[in-house]
Amino acid sequence: METLVCKYFSLICDGSIYVTQYFAIVLSIILISLFFFCLRSNGVYLLDFVCYLPPNHLRVPHAHFIEHFEYCKFEQEIIDFELRLLEKSGIGGEACMPAPVHEIPPDDSLRHGIDEIEMVLFKIVKDLLIKHNVHPKSIDILVSNCSLFCPTPSIPSMIINRFGLRSNIKSFNLSGMGCSAGMLSISLAKDLLRVHKNSLALVLSMEAVAPNGYQGKAKSKLIANVLFRMGGAAILLSNRKQDKKIAKYKLQHLVRTHLGSNEKAYRSVYQDPDEDGVVGVSLSRELLRVAALALRTNITELGPLVLPYSEQLCYAWSVIQTKILLLGHQKEIYVPNFRKAFEHFCIHAGGKSVIDAIEECLKLQKEDGEASRMALYRFGNTSSSSVWYELCYLEAKGRIKKGDRVWQIAFGSGFKCNSAAWKCIADLDPNVRNAWSDRIHSYPIEIPVFDC
């Protein structure tokens, strides 16, 4: 009997040892998993970006622009209208158009649209990959946006074919999103990077000008002929822990606003045929009001994320006085001072009137809109890539320091307002060549103002 009892206790002891060893192994696995989880980066980092610099022979001086309209036998009333628009636009004589637009009459064929895509995107993708010694097969995510030109195969397929990207790459193409599509592409890439760890994302933003010129008579559609010029940007994002050391910026916040349920906002930028059946994009008279409304809605969500508490309290008290206490002496709601949240502003270069309106809405200083005005003057409205030309300008000027915060604001059809808040996490060298390096010394310049 005693022997049986001893054996029983011996088995229990051996079992407890096994149980202890089992729990020790499980605990070790949990601790190791937690360790590696902590090492994994949850941030989205901007390693670098490249903006397209068109060749000088594609420049469109104002005289060339008007002469082109005359040779295309537009009515004098339309030519005068386009000239007034050009004078008020804030665009200089260095902005470029693709070669087919220089032809008389302009060639808007599919082939030339594809040529423009290849000319812009192939160049900037190659420059970006070479600059950072990134092998094409190391790209995990590819997002492109081009609003009005959607060839088959798609733009991402063109890039995959040209550079030999992996067959299992996650590729996406955004169309019909307007000038705010650049921020939408960043938003999509951010969401994908949050899911797919240890990944690189390549984002491409541009608009094809060649196939989208309007040759009709509707004045609301003729505006786009003056404003839009060729350009593009390639952006390299990462969530890899090791890339934090070489990244330029970290994405802090991205806020998207869509006013599509508002009919006036929905119709403010609209592509349709005119009464003669000629397709074009019309810009309504309500556009600036719609943009201001979209911006106010956007900053209502962005403000609490970036503004100091003192500014938030001032805004809240202003709202209470105006809308709750109904005090008559309170004329307008307090506009928070966003200069306390950001050192730099990249306002979509949609046109001089757009930049002026946003500055007034946010109570910014003229110097806050300098990058936007200079990008508009030199490159024109490059649609979704305009905010990157502006950030490129600030870097070339040596104005962005480590720790500075940058606000990119983009507007687009739908109607949309999208904001991205970045923080500089590196010491940037202004001598590194970019799209502005060849003549940054001559900027800022005094942009002429015309009376109309």
Image (tube, rainbow, N blue to C red):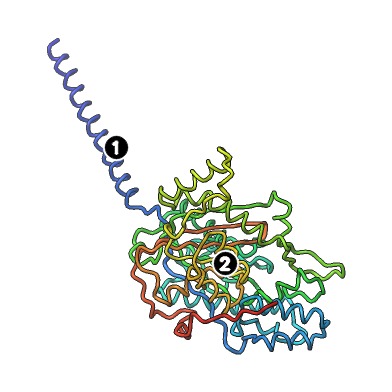
Give the residue type at disc 1. Val
Above or below, comparing residue 240 to residue 232 in the picture: above
Q: Quadrant of residue 228?
A: bottom right
Q: Residue at x 38, y 77 (%)?
A: 430
Image quarter (top left, top right, bottom left or bottom right) of the N terminus:
top left
Image quarter (top left, top right, bottom left or bottom right) of the C terminus:
bottom right
Q: Toward the viewer: 90 or 433?
A: 90
- Mark 2 is surrounded, within 10 Å at the Cα level, by few (under 14), some (14 to 19) or many (20 or more) other residues, namely many
Rendered image: mark on residue 428:
none
Whether tag 2 and tag 1 are in contact, CB under 8 A, the answer is no
Residue topped by disc 2: 348
Residue topped by disc 1: 26
Q: Toward the viewer: 89 or 316?
A: 316
Q: Percent position (x, y) of residue 185?
A: 55, 61
Q: Quadrant of residue 348?
A: bottom right
Q: Percent position (x, y) of residue 80?
A: 77, 81
- Mark 1 is surrounded, within 10 Å at the Cα level, by few (under 14), some (14 to 19) or many (20 or more) other residues, namely few
User: Which residue ends up furthest to the front in the rendered image?
Assistant: 329
Q: Residue at x 55, y 68 (%)?
A: 204
Total of numbered circles in the picture? 2
Secondary structure under the numbered disc 1 in the rendered image: helix
Give the residue type at disc 2. His
Q: Percent position (x, y) of residue 334?
A: 52, 51
User: Which residue ends up furthest to the right in the rendered image?
Assistant: 276
**How many angstroms separate mark 2 from mark 1 (CA)?**
54 Å
- Closer to the N terminus: mark 2 or mark 1? 1
Above or below, comparing residue 23 to residue 411 in the picture: above
Disc 2 vs disc 1: which is toward the camera? Answer: 2
Secondary structure under the numbered disc 2 in the rendered image: loop
Horizontally, is 87 left or right of 255 in the view?
Answer: right
Q: Residue at x 36, y 72 (%)?
A: 428
Q: Percent position (x, y) of residue 422?
A: 44, 61
